[in-house]
Amino acid sequence: MRRRWLLRTLAAGLLSARAPAAAGSAPVRYPPVLPGGALAFPQDFGAHPAWRTEWWYLTGWLDADGRAVGVQITFFRSRTRHDDANPSLFAPKQLLLAHAAVALEGRTQLRHAQRAAREGFGLARFSVDDTDLSIGDWSLRRTPNDRYLATIPADGFRLDLEFRPDAPPFPQGDAGYSRKGPRPEQASRYYSRPQLDVRGSARLGAAADGDTQPVRGKAWLDHEWSSELLDASAAGWDWVGLNLHDGSALMAFRIRRKDGSVLWSHARWIRSAAPAPAPEFEPLRLWRSARSGATYPVEMLLRVGARRLRLVPLFDDQELDTRASTGTIYWEGAMRVLEDGREVGRGYLELTGYAEALRL
């Protein structure tokens, strides 16, 4: 009985959160991200509920008994259009959503799961003091000794992982103010934690065809929040987070207009003295999804100054259909990084706005 009540409450909350604000209610004002100020920790490890959109994004490569495994875990927080002054406990003012996926070497398609719930009623929660999020039995939290713990018991796989940073958070952009377009408010607060050491266990198949096994590897964490990211002319973005074998790391992205031209781009080397001029993404090979009909540039040449990095997917079909949660279809892929024909790193490539223009 309680389970049915919770499901009805969740469904009503999600539907009303996506509906227009009620007539006569105060309009919700989302604060912009503007230049000035700096990130402050530990509070910026936590949630920022006044802003419209926020995510904690983990991607990594693991070794499971000699087999490569790509892993993606993302928790999203979304402030809805419901008036914060509404005293009703049933007003869904904040939504939490999550995606998780594993890409297994030797397979040809992702295993993917997603969750969505309104805050409260035991369905989902977040903390403003530190990274501490949960949706049902999915969770991500940071410990006092600066470890991130993720527990994802999904249908078809399970992840119990600890992520260990070896350096403080790295502010992206200008002290954490990261431009995403020509207007100053088209920006986010953004920091990264690359080269995370990962340890833990994973069940990489259903109970009948997969055993829990120890895993180790390297990962990347991004934490970002904003109220307005994309210009009206933008269709989506291409983004990479690359952990290189020499200990350095590279973040690069481009925002694409609907006609395919570049609206905005940026790159940043982390733990490297090399400058990072504007990146250039050159598609080398396309893959078409039989499910969505979208065509993605799944193999890329990334130029950053004198560096020429070839991004090669673990396999082509790493498309995610998240219309049941964040409402979009995109491609999120584990990539090998080649330079002069040899592997120099590993990371993830995210491609949005290819199935349809991205809506946040």
Image (spheres, rainbow, N blue to C red):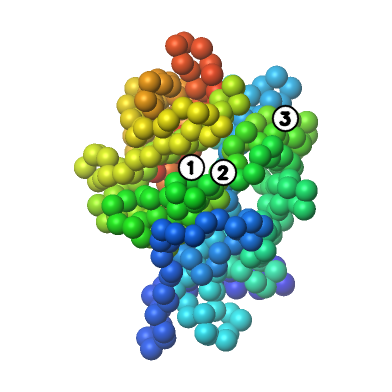
Q: Quick one: label 2 or label 1, which is nearer the N terminus?
A: 2
Taking the view exactly as shown, the residue that stands out farthest to the bottom is 24
- For residue 304, side relative to residue 199 (left or right): left
Mark 1 highlights which residue?
320
Q: Quick one: label 2 or label 3, which is nearer the N terminus?
A: 2
Q: Nearer the viewer, residue 197 or 268?
A: 268
What kind of residue is marked 2?
Phe
Q: Quick one: label 3 or label 1, which is nearer the N terminus?
A: 3
Residue 209 placement: quadrant = top right
Residue 145 locus on image (x, y percent): 78, 48
Report the residue at 67% width, 22% height from top: 67
Report the residue at 33% width, 58% height from top: 184
Residue 61 locus on image (x, y percent): 62, 30
Q: Is residue 132 above or below residue 174?
A: below
C-alpha separation, residue under disc 2 versus residue under disc 1: 28 Å
What kind of residue is marked 1?
Leu
Element carrying mark 3 = strand
Element carrying mark 2 = strand
Residue 263 placement: quadrant = top left
What kind of residue is marked 3?
Arg
Report the residue at 67% width, 63% height from top: 129
Q: Nearer the viewer, mark 3 or mark 1?
A: 3
Q: Nearer the viewer, mark 2 or mark 3?
A: 2
Q: Nearer the viewer, residue 133 or 195?
A: 195
Residue 80 locus on image (x, y percent): 47, 70
Mark 2 highlights which residue?
170
**Label 2 neighbour load within 10 Å: few <14, some 14-19, many 20+:** some
Mark 3 highlights which residue?
216
